Image (cartoon, rainbow, N blue to C red):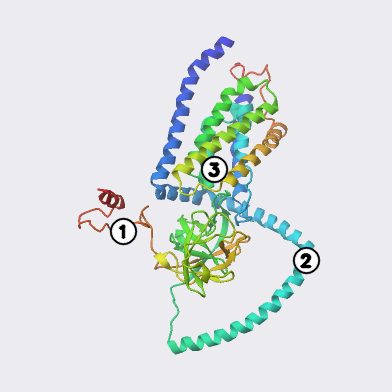
Amino acid sequence: MDSGLLKTWGMRLMFVFLALIILFFHLLPLNPAPSRWAGPDVLVAVIFAWSVRRPDYVPMLLVASVMLMADMMLQRPPGLWAVLVVCAAEWLKSRERRQRESTFVLEWLTFASTLVVITMLYRAVTMVLMPSPGVLALSLVQVLMTIAIYPVVVAVSYVLLSVRRAAPGDVDRFGKPI
Amino acid sequence: MAKNGTNSEAYTTPLRRLLLAVVILSLLGLFFVWRIDSPRVERFRAAVIDRVLPSFDWAMAPVTATVNLARDFRSYQRIYEQNQELRRELRQMSSWKEAALQLEQENAKLRDLNNVRLDPRLTYITGVVLADSGSPFRQSLLINVGSRDGIVDGWATMDGTGLVGRVSGVGANTSRVIMLTDATSRIPATIQPSGQRALIVGDNSPAPPIDFLENPDQVRPGDRIVTSGDGDVFPPGLLIGQVAQDPGGRLRTRPAADFERLEFLRVLRDHGARRVSNPSALVLPETPPTAGPTAEPDADAATAEREN
């Protein structure tokens, strides 16, 4: 087995492991009382950050199953947030080639607008179809926190896990430029 | 090289698009199935969590304990003030205890006169809190007792003092408790001493408002709120909390249960509770009134007939 393939699969495993850790910390029963603020959705930040940098580390089926698992565990309507995140991640992947030369600020803005759009879609669907869509202020806080945490997620992925954009000369294992 | 790349992309891209479409459609399908037949999917969710979460438990308990320890450690900084506070409270409590003892004796005498037997069916099962809902939009807890221990959907749960919520979703080893602060929680209650009936409406805030009150003038902040037993939702007389008034003048509930620290929950066995098995059973009668002996006792058929 060649090292490129091994690395890709290792990073995919790493992604699943990260997702499990994030879910674990979401589920810790530290303070069951309702709070006025909401934590960031780190899992979405990780998926988007990796989709922009290395789409091959977060294949679509993996993203779909991880997000479905998160929907199940976190008491969200199953499938809805997952489908929005999968679509957004695929859209970001399709832009990845064009974004390669752009600055981080531009990428951050793209992330923020994508997140706002899918959150608005989510709110719209839940408002139409569910009896209690949840507090709007909490959604807003969550979006803002996620946007704020994005640079941290990118930095940690870059430094600790070395998830960075493919350099111009890089080729994949078939000799095709990534 | 570049030509080769575009060539292979020409083969893979339609396949990937097809796969993407299949995934999107199946996820959306799952969502709509959930919306249409929520209990079935929720049972599936309970089964998934029942399988996955106990395997997290070995790590969850120590991490939770460590974080709580660190929090407690911070509270040592104001230990002197706390001590004074506790002494003051203790003085108040001892006078209350005196009053309670006298009342207990009087109560026992009166019961003896009336020949009252207390309801022996209200026993409880204690469970440990495994996890919370994991999302700020849902107020629920997962406890480590399930259908294996005889837990049934709809039973009331309390901490030592007050009502916490209602069991909703039972797996083999775990069950979910929807807390009374959740936005979907509605609990019929009686406010003592005036005896007013009301509904405690969860709204994702620490102090759920009191709604559908007959006569708000008879209710004052500090009154006790207990469950009324209406609609067979809960056994009557469980302590919920006290009435409080927010700055806007709205009456709210200050729950007696300590939602900041819930480690153990009591699930009250309640064999009189109404079981909700199909989606519309709460709203519609179990058997449609016009149905003959051969007709299916189907609630959807009942609505269809009613509309015709």
Q: What amino acid type should be assigned to the residue bearing mark 3?
A: Ala
The residue tagged 3 is A70
Judge whether B167 appears above or below B195 on screen.
above
Mark 1 vs mark 2: tell me if same chain. Answer: yes
Report x, y in % for residue B263. Answer: 60, 62
Q: Chain of mark 3?
A: A
- Determine the chain carrying the residue at label 1: B
Identify the residue position indicated by label 1 in the image.
B286
> Which type of secondary structure does the marked residue at label 3 adopt?
helix
Identify the mark at residue B79; answer none if there is no mark. Answer: 2
Q: Position of residue A6 (x, y in %)?
A: 61, 28
Q: In which image quadrant can residue B68 be found?
A: bottom right
Q: Is residue A10 visible?
A: no
Q: CA distance from mark 1 to mark 2?
A: 57 Å
Label 2 near label 3: C-beta < 8 Å?
no
Element type where label 1 sits in the image: loop
Mark 1 residue type? Glu
Type of the residue with mark 2: Ile
Give coordinates of residue B296: x percent, y percent.
25, 53
Few, some or many residues within 10 Å of mark 3 (<14, 14–19, 20+)? many
**Quick check: B146 left or right of B71?**
left
Give the side of residue B109 with respect to residue B64, left or right.
left
Q: Quadrant of residue A90?
A: top right
Instruction: Check chain identity for marks 3 and 2: say if they share one.
Output: no
Q: Residues within 10 Å of mark 1 (few under 14, many from 20)?
A: some
Q: Decide: is B172 above or below A164.
A: below
Question: Callout 2: helix, strand or loop?
Answer: helix
Front-lying residue, B251 or A161: B251
Note whether A30 is above or below A172 in the view shown: below
For the C terminus of chain A, give its image quadrant. Answer: top right
Q: CA distance from mark 3 to mark 2?
A: 41 Å
